[in-house]
Amino acid sequence: MAHSSRISPTHAATLIADGSTIALSASGGGLGEPDTILEAIEARFLETGHPRNLTLVHALGLGDRDRRGTNRFAHEGMVKRVIGGHWTWSPSMQALAAEERIEAYSLPSGVISLLIREIGAGRPGLITKTGLDTFVDPRRQGGKVNASAQDDLVELMAIDGEEYLRFKPFRIDVGIIRGTAADSAGNVTAREEPADLDMFSVALATHNCGGITIAQVRDHVACGAIAARDVCIPAFMVAHVVVVPDQFQTYRGGYDISLAGLQLRADLSPSQAVDRGLRRVVALRAAEELRPGTTVNFGFGMSAGVAGVIAERKDDNLYSITIEQGIHGGAIETGDLFGMAVNPTAIISSTEQFDIYHGGGLDIAFLGMAEFDSMGNVNVSHLSGKIVGPGGFIDIAQNAQKVVFCGTFDAKSAQIEVVKGGLAIHSHGLIRKLVREVAAVTFSGKQARLRNQEVIFVTERAVFRLVDEGIELVEYAEGVDVEADVIARMGFRPIVRNPRPMNPDCFQP
């Protein structure tokens, strides 16, 4: 007996009532994105003005910076509230937040994913230390990223004398997910997808809240045609199935089953190439912090260059490589397709992956940095007045045993030449990144000290570390005047004891 019905995208759009809370499971580059359903919802709103006043919840960022993903919802009146982990893929949604036309909240991606799981399990929200002393702490901003956001989604509490945050549960009315195929009963498999993400948690929470889960799939098969081990969402959790035969796996189009670990590709992904110039300097120096046998994570952006260094050296067998989308091993994609890998060795749900991170199972994290300050605080979530969101940054950075932040020393219009063994600085950047106080705290130096966490900051011209007294300058590039090119260009004076030259092999003209 069928548990779910097969419907058209247009029909699916009519099932969403005004004021609904919608949870999406997807990630950047089109990963897991049910775009045909989202497009139909957008088309209905533009034609009829409904559904409107929606609350949109997504743990990971999704979109193409233009029309797809959360951009489909970025119309005034369509959404009243967004709770998002990462916003950068939707400039139009960022604009709505900046113009106070929606209530904008941003929470760590892992926190949102785990909170959705807790909602599905009927528990009183997510209780965790993750986020303490960052902008999601209610003593700071409580995750509110514009003035229109007035409700308190998180509260501070104490258990056995220790501080925790409780992220409050809410009802989910509609869950929208994507798989590869569904059978006539409604069982869904993600067998050929690059990741499972948090689709199970979204379906669980939606079903147990009394809502409806709509699954977009490429294929519709007979009942029993999907092996039991390949079913990721059982039929009773799925209310409706939308079949899209030309569904894409990623924004590149088509399906590459090496991204799902079903076929080995001999060649590495083209996006594994490490840039030349300053980005390569930073990647090579950061890679010196690697230790064989460790479990590591790479963030989006410049820090992903370390994954490229590993790929170039064919050293992937030396480390347990992970990213928050639930991917283990393989050649990590970079750029807009970050979140998947060619030839992964394991794929678990992002919810399970964040459990690993929150529990302290990560040895080293390589992450980007937009700016950091004299207290060791780092900001990556609030840039130039725009909300970017932390993504998995807080979940990872706060809980890793060691964190290596990667970024250029300054930004905009710097003219720096990589020469043999060092640098030649012709002009400095116009934007200072080492500041007295960051615009928002996405990583807390105070919390790092309390946990005795090892923290390194790698730039092309200097390397710093977090110590009890503050920020210490430990290395500098040859060709750099430490006082004029480093200290004088900072918003604070670092501790200077016995800095040494950076490894000249990091500088490859």
Image (cartoon, helix red, strand yellow):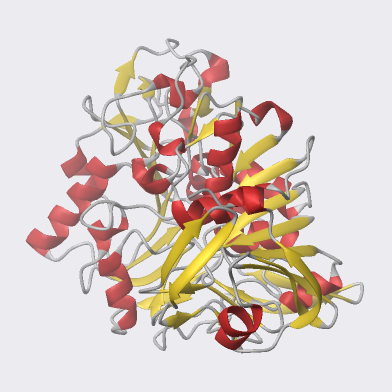
Q: Which residue is drawn at 27% across and 58% down?
A: 65
Q: In which quarter of the image is residue 98?
A: bottom left
Compared with 111, 140 (above or below) is below
Does 386 sit left or right of 35 as displayed? right
Any part of residue 424 in sight: yes
Which of the pair 128/337 is nearer the observer? Answer: 337
Does 292 sit left or right of 506 as displayed? right
Compared with 277, 229 (above or below) is above
Q: Residue at x 69, y 54 (%)?
A: 503
Q: Quadrant of residue 111?
A: bottom right
State the image coordinates of residue 506 (x, y, percent, origin top left).
61, 50
Q: Which corner quadrant holds the N terminus?
A: top left
Q: Quadrant of residue 167?
A: bottom right
Q: Which residue is drawn at 27% across and 26% down?
A: 254
State the image coordinates of residue 155 (x, y, percent, origin top left).
67, 78
Does 264 sit left or right of 217 as displayed? right
State the image coordinates of residue 394 (x, y, percent, origin top left).
63, 64
Which residue, as the protein is rendered here, is positioned at the far left?
A: 47
Any part of residue 326 in sight: no
Compared with 265, 369 (above or below) is below
Which residue, as the protein is rendered here, is positioned at the far right?
A: 160
Q: Residue at x 47, y 25 (%)?
A: 260
State the image coordinates of residue 134 (x, y, percent, origin top left).
64, 76
Which of the pair 435/158 is nearer the observer? Answer: 435
So how many labels did they put on this image? Answer: 0
